[in-house]
Image (spheres, rainbow, N blue to C red):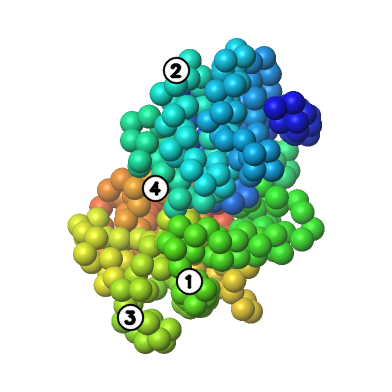
Amino acid sequence: MEKLYELFYAKLAETPTGFMRYLHQHINWGNRIIAILGERGVGKTTLILQKIKQDGIDNTLYFSADNVYFGQHTLFDTANEFYRKGGKRLYIDEIHKYPSWSTELKMIYDYCPQLQVVVTGSSILDLYKGIADLSRRVIMYVLAGLSFREYLAMAKGINLTPVSFDDILNHKVVFPEGERPLALFDDYLKTGFYPFWHEADYMTRLNNVINQTVENDIPTYARMNVATSRKLKQLLFIISQSVPFKPNYTEIGAAMECDRGTVADLAFYMEKARLIMSLRHQDDGMKNFGKLGKIYLGNTNLIYALSEGKPDVGNIRETFFLSQMKVSQEVYASKAADFIVNGKTFEVGGKSKGKKQIAEIKDAFVVKDDIEYGYGNIIPLWHFGMSY
């Protein structure tokens, strides 16, 4: 176990503490078993290492479940030995990479009653399944990618507090004097959703994240063969060229040479893995998903990574709005405009977008790109990036 401690301390020494993600203050760190889920690259490891730095390292151990140490040791035996020696807080990173993790995590819960365990995982599908097996024992949180507000803090040193949904609508977003938000917003839309925004090969790394999810995470969870996993890439390409669109799984299936049920399953897996987002009408049940659902890519950076040529600006605007709002709000499709959030209707467009489409709708707003300030029921698009 000494090697685990050595790697833990080395990892901790490299962890920055200048900025903490929004989720840090929302987690009830007193729960016995906490699971932090999130797609690859959104900053889960940094989040838990920052928590350790905040609390101190006494009686604490961190390790990644894919460490070669677990070729000869079990997760339970390691945790139990740590517990018997006075351990109180155990942090397990990438737990989904340990084959029987859910069974042994249950054993840790049952046989180490005073041990607090925090786990993270990037294979969201596998974790959802395992946590369902653990039932009431695990409290689950999901870490989203960077909001525009968080990107400003990390990339530009512009520290702003989150703004509530109601305060956004009431024009209470304040930007530092002398700073211009629109150019920064454009940078965020292209390369600001993931904390590795500063890396020169950002798009290469982002494509690696996509490939790992499509080639490894989803096929492993769904027990797919190679031919089926290739269809995931084919469907993702079709979606990237068409979004946002109302999916016709029969037509897509014909193009992919598979049945509509297979297409629906693949779309479900990609949504759970956060490669895509679906939008439904508030009064529609799951039975109407194939007919009435609208599909978007999971965030605007994915649009730039997957689109060939110049991406559609309308798609980028709507994807941004949905990706930011769905972190803390229920978002539905509007039959008259684009979105409904908390009973309010939103039409998203450019700075020349008019009010005609929402003229007869109560509590309706025009969300405009390329404007710094709003007034009345006109809200700048970038303001919605201040919500978390």
Which mark, residue 225? 1
Q: Amino acid at mark 4?
A: Lys
Distance, label 4 to label 3, CA atoms, is 25 Å
Give the left or right position of residue 110, taking residue 374 as reference: left
Q: Is residue 131 visible?
A: yes
Distance, label 4 to label 2, CA atoms, is 23 Å
Q: Amino acid at mark 2?
A: Pro
Q: Nearer the viewer, residue 204 or 86?
A: 86
Q: Quadrant of residue 151?
A: top right
Distance, label 4 to label 1, CA atoms, is 20 Å
Q: Nearer the viewer, residue 273 or 32?
A: 32
Q: Earlier in the sequence, mark 4 or mark 3?
A: 4
- Residue at horizontal 70 percent and vertical 52 percent from the top: 197
Residue assigned mark 4: 129
Q: Earlier in the sequence, mark 4 or mark 1?
A: 4
Nearest to viewer (mark 3 / mark 2): 2
Which mark, residue 147? none
Q: Earlier in the sequence, mark 1 or mark 3?
A: 1
Disc 1 secondary structure class: loop
Q: Earlier in the sequence, mark 4 or mark 2?
A: 2
Residue assigned mark 3: 259
Question: Eyeballing the image, is 301 above or below 14?
Answer: below
